Image (cartoon, helix red, strand yellow):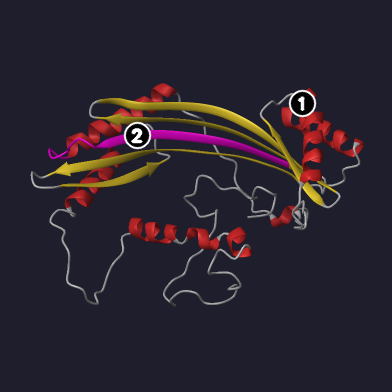
Amino acid sequence: MSKFDILKNIVKESSEKRGISEYELYYSEDASISAETYRDEISAFSSSVGGMLLYRCIVDGKIGYASTERMEEDEMDALVSRAAVNAACIEKEDRAIIFGGAKPEDYQKVDPIDFTMPTAATIREEAMKCRDILYAADDRIADGTECGAFAGQSTIRLFNSHGLDLGTSVGNCGEYLQAVLDNGEEKQYDFEMLYNKYGDNADELKEIADKVIAGANAKFGAGKVATGKYNIIFDHKQMKAILSTFLSAFYAENAQKGLSLLKDKTGEVIAADCITITDTPFFASNPMKIAFDGEGVPT
């Protein structure tokens, strides 16, 4: 039996002892590691590991929360007690909900990942490899040029009183190359990333480096144009930046609070006919496919 299964059984007993019939236990464990370069050395390095248990329960129609990073059996009863006390302090009249309306077949089948966190030495080597390849790509490389490598892994478990018992583990790694070019009159930069291709990837990194150099080079000589109507092609990076400006408008909480122009717009056309945006965690190249959200709702 896993540590989480032991803890959830204690939480279940503690909840039932207090007469709490609706509750949820959410567990997450995260690890990350990264390195960055500046000039010819590692300029930054970080490594972290952390975990958390979050317990939610409904008491007298109000939802209470409590969390802990102490994953010990004797902590679980106190966790339940703190959440119950917290519920008594809630003044909001919003209807409290613990999700339980999905069947096993509602969840997307996600293949288990084959991912192992790289060592600190590997992260350093990958970052320096990116640096060496990028600096060799063009003699106009200037200060401000950076490269880096990173990796992260997460394990999530969710259990509630409605019968949900979900779990997943996801992870990915990547490298980025950001070049600053100086042609003697001005400086320009561009960047690209490569995901999940550690190890024997020098040829791919060389292609990425050439793309970065070409992107920065294309910006030299840019200037203002006269006001008017023009046909414009947006680079995918710029389209992402434009969309990110409007991202908060799509948050349900903002719409519910009247802070979004999309309030009450469900089902209405809000963009030009040529625009189609799909939000899905299951596109083929996504290394972080998760079949459920933070409350257990199928994604």
> Magenta region, mostly helix, strand or loop?
strand
Q: Look at the image and give the residue range highlighted in magenta.
A: 138-158
Residue type at numbered disc 1? Glu
Relative image position of residue 270 (x, y in whole percent): 50, 74
Q: Which kind of residue does numbered mark 2 sit on? A: Gly
Residue position marked by numbered label 1 in the rendering: 75
Whether 178 is drawn above or below 241: the answer is above
Question: Which is more toward the observer, 172 or 180?
Answer: 180
Q: Residue at x 84, y 36 (%)?
A: 12
Is 141 inside the magenta-drawn segment? Answer: yes
Q: Which residue is mark 2?
A: 148
Quadrant, the N terminus? top right
Figure check: 126 above or below 231: above
**For residue 41, which numbered disc appears in the image?**
none
Element type at marker 2? strand
Residue shown at 70% from the left, 26% from the top: 71
Q: Nearer the viewer, residue 206 or 257?
A: 257
Instruction: Give coordinates of residue 286: x percent, y percent.
Output: 49, 49
Q: 10 Å neighbourhood of mark 1: few (<14), some, or many (≥20)?
A: some
**Residue drawn 54% across and 65% down?**
260
Examine the rendered structure and indicate whether residue 211 appears above or below residue 234. Answer: above
Name the residue located 74 percent from the left edge and 54 percent from the top edge. Answer: 92
